Image (cartoon, rainbow, N blue to C red):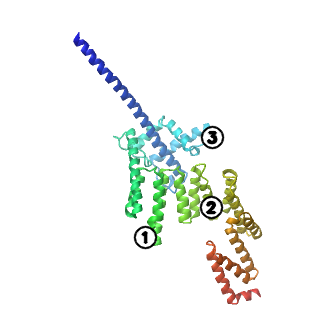
Amino acid sequence: MAGEAAERRRFEGLRRFVVPFILLLCVVALLSKRLEYLSTSYAFYSWLDARITETERLISLPSMEEQEETEEDVFFKKVRGDLDERLRETFSITVSDLDPTHLWKLVLAEMKRPTRWEFETLARQGKLDLPYGAIEWSEETVGAHLGSLILGFRSAVADLLWLKVDDYWHQGRMEMMLPMMYTVVRLDPHFIDAWAVGAWHLAYNAGVTVDTLEKKREFVDKAIEFLQDGVKRNPRHFQLYFELGYTMYFVKLEDYKNAAHYLEYSRRYRPPANKWIDRMLLHAYERGGELDKALQGWKVYLEKVDPDSDVARRFIVQLKAEIAQRDGREDEALERWQEILERFPNVSEKAEVEIIKINAKRAESAGDYEKALALWQSLANRVYPDAYDEALANVARLNLLMSSGKAATSSD
């Protein structure tokens, strides 16, 4: 009897240990499967989003038509075709119309279909160009849940290394800073500030270490390539498009066509409260010569973005003046410039400059070279940065013309 009682106690003790342990294993297994599902879904979301971005030519990447079609291309066309067909039937939209939240929900549903098996098979065979940060599917021994944990450590290490990048910057050790910067974004490709600040260092600070304009431009080109890589890894983040459009092309290179190209996509993904991007895009249109597009944009901005904006009202009048001036309607242009002087006296420098230019050119056309010379000289004396060189050139030209007697002959 005593033996049987002892056996029962051992059995009860074992059962109290084994049953919770089995339950724990079941919970762990369920969590593991859930993590695998979410990790697969995230990898598929990142891959699909990047491929859609490439197809829509948001960044300068080779088109699929220019390359030999791969198994990845075939799979992408099949997936997108199926998704677009279902979305058109139900909502009359396509995948490219979805915002990130709805695209993610669509992906979660798609991963319950045979698509998941096809995706994992191609990924494990190394036939998919997965964005950085996705799990290394080609490693058969690495589970999806383990990959997620590794990614967490990678981000933590990237944060620590970024602190080291900052130290190197303050020490002036550019040769140590740049390799470390590249390492950071490889470890954590979604570290947006690392992409943005790293590009700034390349374009503005690294260039200080070289002497020739050609070598300085090489660093700017590296910064642009760096940001384009960041855009490829984060195709729906507005900040990297903005850095490309404004910091690089608008400010650094004064290439307003490319500035507008990237700012358009920055505007597409910007937070609703960010009005700065809208304004910089419209300035890029204007400086790039797209005056009609800029005018229409400011009208929309005033109507839908900021109805109280005096900045928008001023630029609407200014663009009407520039368009009239471009089209040879000088009287209308003068009226518009004068309107700016009266309505916006604190920011009327451009209006003053353009009024003087128009009157100087009119005086010269009428043969009144002295008046034209006086007007150009008054503009040079004011030292307006955007008009100073032009004013000096015209003063020199008119002085030479008058001193040579050609002016007098022409007047006769």
Give the Cα distance between marks 3 and 1: 55 Å
Under mark 3, the amino acid is Ser
**Can residue 229 be seen?**
no
Which residue does the numbered mark 3 point to in the structure image?
92
Q: Secondary structure at mark 2?
A: helix
Q: Residue furthest left?
A: 3
Q: Nearer the viewer, residue 382 or 239?
A: 382
The amino acid marked with disc number 2 is His
Q: Secondary structure at mark 3?
A: loop
Which mark is on residue 210?
1
- Residue at point 67%, 56% (across, down): 297
Residue 354 relative to residue 208: left or right: right
Residue 146 pos. (x, y %): 37, 40
- Estimate how packed mark 3 is, as few (under 14), some (14 to 19) or many (20 or more) residues with alpha carbons within 10 Å: few
Q: Looking at this rendering, what residue extends furthest in the top direction?
A: 1
Residue 144 is situated, as x and y percent measured from the top left of the image, at 39, 39
Q: Nearer the viewer, residue 339 or 182?
A: 339
Disc 3 vs disc 1: which is toward the camera?
Answer: 1
Q: Amino acid at mark 1?
A: Val
Please report the residue visible at 57 percent of the width from the left and 41 percent of the height from the top: 84
Which circle's residue, 3 or 1, is located before the other in the chain? 3
Q: Residue 401's spot in the image, x, y percent? A: 68, 86
Picture disc at residue 283: 2
Q: Is residue 336 above or below residue 140?
A: below
Image quarter where the N terminus lies is: top left
